[in-house]
Amino acid sequence: MKNSISIPAARRGFYLFIITCLLFVTASVSADLYNNEDLAEFAEEWQQSCSSGNNWCNGYDYDISGTVDEDDLARFANIWLTSKDWVLSDDIADWIVDRGYTTGLDTYKWNYDRGFVLLSLYEKWLVKPDPTYLEFIKAWVDDIIQPDGSIVPPGNPTYYQITKYNQDHIQPGNLLVFMYELFGDNKYLLAMNNNLIVQLNQQPTTYDGGFWHKSNYPYQMWLDGLYMTEPFVCRYAQLTGDSSWYDVAGFQLTKVAEHTQHSQIYGSGTGLCYHGWDSSALETPPQTPRGWAHPTYYHSPEFWGRAVGWYTMALVDCLDLMPPTHPDRTEMLTVLSDLAASLVPHQDATTGMWYQVLDKGTLPDNWVETSCSLMFSYAFARAVEAGYLPEVPYLAASRTAFEGVVANKLSYSSGYIVLTGTVSVGSLGGYNSYSGGYSYYVNSGTTTNDIKGVGAFMRAALQYEKMTP
């Protein structure tokens, strides 16, 4: 199943004729656009045999199919007269491809962080179809996915197991959708059907149907998990035509808000969402809640930036993917609107970024955090572009956050990006090992070039570059 642009054979000669004619069109006065010189080079590579050995026909076999064909022509048309000037997302992509394997992007784990940064690189490829980006993504996936569709990370063959019911292991499934659409290899579909979809069909739930975050965190819903699963199931629904998965996404996205969004729990107040919720005490028979669970409402005690960032992106991405008439969209838009309205007042006036604990920026030991700031920057800008949020004040908030990260958290070393200030981890796991309290989050520590932060950086940069004149 190759997701190609359908061009009848009789018209292919016509497209070659158009290419020839365009060569005689006067080039743009702008010195660095995709223009007639590029078109001439493209025509020279037409129907040639391509591989990594000849740099995929000098970069014109955009989809690494082995030849420059009508699909590549369509992609060339998409970038015609666009700028070739340097943009920041180019540098982010260079770091992912050139340095990623030495800084966390190995194939030892089939996990959300790797899936997330590679999804961001795929989104860069859609804008700038450099075949080296797609080759890099495909190589990572093919290193793990076996011909029978089994998920076997090299050096760690038992890492993925359905019965772990870990939502973090669903997120890389987005890459399987893309690979199947582009290359049609059945192993990608088998990996989805026989592993990820089987897992989700068996995923343990709270008494009211919310997915557990993973099997060893029983009865817990986390905001993080909504990003790990719901965009994938929406893409799977698009791929297969099984619309029931849109219903799953809408249900889970709105269910978690019932239990974590302050304004829904208490009937008023902030629209921010707590990191997680524990249904233990409400199960039949009742179980022992985690130490962090509120004694009445069972939510965790703080609004952790990155968890809210994951959830905000999940809402926006699923709104993009779900049918416009889906009945859960109205509630999703309300949740997004209330959440966004509550985030803006907590944006730091000095840096434009958001804090590790979102609503406690005045406390001296709290600090501005990179990954959540970039996630909100992306989500706000995309929501404005799609009409989910009004331009004022959200587009300015998005731009200010992105520019604040660039000014305060970005530097270069040996020609590559150095992105600082990304929180190492945030968890509610175990019974009492993670308190979920303020002190836990602000003492979690930060890392440099964390691939979760880099993935968010790419998504925010692409949106910023698209929407900034």
Image (cartoon, helix red, strand yellow):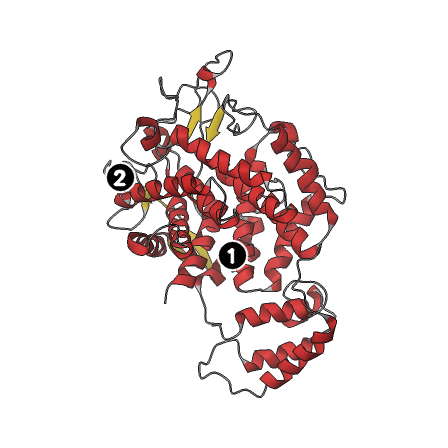
Quarter of the figure that contains the N terminus:
bottom right
**Three-letter code, disc 1:** Trp
In the displayed structure, 346 sits above or below 4; it is: above
- Name the foreground residue: 44 vs 442: 44
Left or right, residue 415 beside residue 102: left
The alpha-carbon separation of the residues under discs 1 and 2 comes to 31 Å
Q: Could you say which quadrant of the image residue 65 lies in?
A: bottom right
Q: Which residue is mark 1?
A: 95
- Residue closest to the eye, 280 or 239: 239
Q: Is label 1 or label 2 in front?
A: 2
Label 2 residue SS: loop
Residue most extreme to the right: 148
Residue 136 x/y as whole percent: 62, 56
Q: Residue furthest top?
A: 285
Label 1 crowd (10 A; few <14 / some 14-19 / many >=20): some
x and y, in percent, of residue 186 in the image: 74, 48
**Residue for point 46% across, 81% down:** 31
Horizontal side of 448 relative to 42 (left or right) equals left
Between disc 1 and disc 2, whose residue precedes? Answer: 1
Q: Is residue 240 above or below residue 28?
A: above
